[in-house]
């Protein structure tokens, strides 16, 4: 079986974007399937003996204009070996699998691909947000997959047909062993036995970092030796400015000793492994995968989490009213007092944190193991091929 995976960004490291991360783990979890993937002419190529790489993008980071240029080249040279390689030219593509959020331009362009009308098509929607701006006119696949039940319902209510829910997945074994390595991982960071709260996010306003900053003094006043780790990759010149401003704000609060910054995150295993709590204080789900990958990784590692109570991310929490039967706590978005209360409570309640960690790791193992998720996609491929 040969599947052509179409993404809106090149499938190259760094693995810091939810849709291309999922595309990569899906292809690696199905080694028996040949995948044609879109990569860049620069940077480190993805690993995988089952990958046929089409170096269509100029670099790992591309602009909207560059993406449009790539799509136009695909249409203009769809039969060219220089662009698509031997397998595509000879018509060996069995299925097209789109993994991206569509817009009117991308849909219009892809509909012009000649082979698209002669092959089954699957479209995975990694992110739907909290409001649905995706109508049926943007979709032309035989099956549309939502990462969340919330997303599935929104798309269906909008008139999109043949929508199903398949959750995202991660490699569980990469993270499960971390639950027993907290002291060791803290030692590697020189943290001793002080409690650690990890914020694995970005500097954008809707990620909720301002809410977390407002909560800091309250948490430190209750747990003076707490250490906050801000793991925020610097993706643009603006991010450097944001980081300096935030460091200045923390300094003015005289909390510098309680905060560490990691702007080049090469070892997320150690940062999550060293953490006692991982926090996701999002104000909304704009531009975010429905169920963030890092959230799944933290839960798989047995870490309790604190998240904003917004869909579709809050689907990860069970419906039980007993907090111990959840992977963590939810708080209203943009509420620093509620966030400080939740973080302080979990820092003090060590046994509760452990129980939540066990619950969360079991939940991810049951529903988000990439091997199980990939088997559902393979079954879907076979079903569409008849």
Image (tube, rainbow, N blue to C red):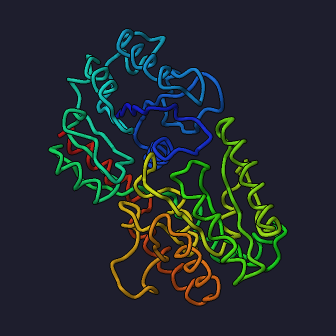
The reply, left or right, for residue 367 in relation to residue 260 is left
Q: Report x, y in % for residue 176.
A: 58, 70
Q: Residue at x 33, y 24 (%)?
A: 105
Q: What residue is drawn where x is 34% and y is 16%?
A: 90
Q: Nearer the viewer, residue 335 or 171?
A: 335
Q: Position of residue 226 (x, y in %)?
A: 74, 76
Depicted 249 relative to depicted 134: above or below: below
Q: Relative to 139, does residue 283 appear above or below in the rendering? A: below
Q: Nearer the viewer, residue 323 or 59?
A: 323
Q: Quadrant of residue 198?
A: bottom right
Q: How many marks?
A: 0
Q: Which residue is depicted at the point 70% across and 51% down?
A: 265
On the image, the x and y values in percent for residue 154 come to 23, 52
Residue 114 is situated, as x and y percent measured from the top left of the image, at 26, 16
Say left or right for 294 vs 126.
right
Instruction: Say which residue appears at 60% left-offset and 25% top-offset.
Output: 59
Q: Quadrant of the C terminus?
A: top left
- Which corner quadrant of the image does residue 267 belong to? bottom right
Q: Residue furthest front?
A: 252
The image quadrant where one finds the N terminus is top left
């Amino acid at each position: 079986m040969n599947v052509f995976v179409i993404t809106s960004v090149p499938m190259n490291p760094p693995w810091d974007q939810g849709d291309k991360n999922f595309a990569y783990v899906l292809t690696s979890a199905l080694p028996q399937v040949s995948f044609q993937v879109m990569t860049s002419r620069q940077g480190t190529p993805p690993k995988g003996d089952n990958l046929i790489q089409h170096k269509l993008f100029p670099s790992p980071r591309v602009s909207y204009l560059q993406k449009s240029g790539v799509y136009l080249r695909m249409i203009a040279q769809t039969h060219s070996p220089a662009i698509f390689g031997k397998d595509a030219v000879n018509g060996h593509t069995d299925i097209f699998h789109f993994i991206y959020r569509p817009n009117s331009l991308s849909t219009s362009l892809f509909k012009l691909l000649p082979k698209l009308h002669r092959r089954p098509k699957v479209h995975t929607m990694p992110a739907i947000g909290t409001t649905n701006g995706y109508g049926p006119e943007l979709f032309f696949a035989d099956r549309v997959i939502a990462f969340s039940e919330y997303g599935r319902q929104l798309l269906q209510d909008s008139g999109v047909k043949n929508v199903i829910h398949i959750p995202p997945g991660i490699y569980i074994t990469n993270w499960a062993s971390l639950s027993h390595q907290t002291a060791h991982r803290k030692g590697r960071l020189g943290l001793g036995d002080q409690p650690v709260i990890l914020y694995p996010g970005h500097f954008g306003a809707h990620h909720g970092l301002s809410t977390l900053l407002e909560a800091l003094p309250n948490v430190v006043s209750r747990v003076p030796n707490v250490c906050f780790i801000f793991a925020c990759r610097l993706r643009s010149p603006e991010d450097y400015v944001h980081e300096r401003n935030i460091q200045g704000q923390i300094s003015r609060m005289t909390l510098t000793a309680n905060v560490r910054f990691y702007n080049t995150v090469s070892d997320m295993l150690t940062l999550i492994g060293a953490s006692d709590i991982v926090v996701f204080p999002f104000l909304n789900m704009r531009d975010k995968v429905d169920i963030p990958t890092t959230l799944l990784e933290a839960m798989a590692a047995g870490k309790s989490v604190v998240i904003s109570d917004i869909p579709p991310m809050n689907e990860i929490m069970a419906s039980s009213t007993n907090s111990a039967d959840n992977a963590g706590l939810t708080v209203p978005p943009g509420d620093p007092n509620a966030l400080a209360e939740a973080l302080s409570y979990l820092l003090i309640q060590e046994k509760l944190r452990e129980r939540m960690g066990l619950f969360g790791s079991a939940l991810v193992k049951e529903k988000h193991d990439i091997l199980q998720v990939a088997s559902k996609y393979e079954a879907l491929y076979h079903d569409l091929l008849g």
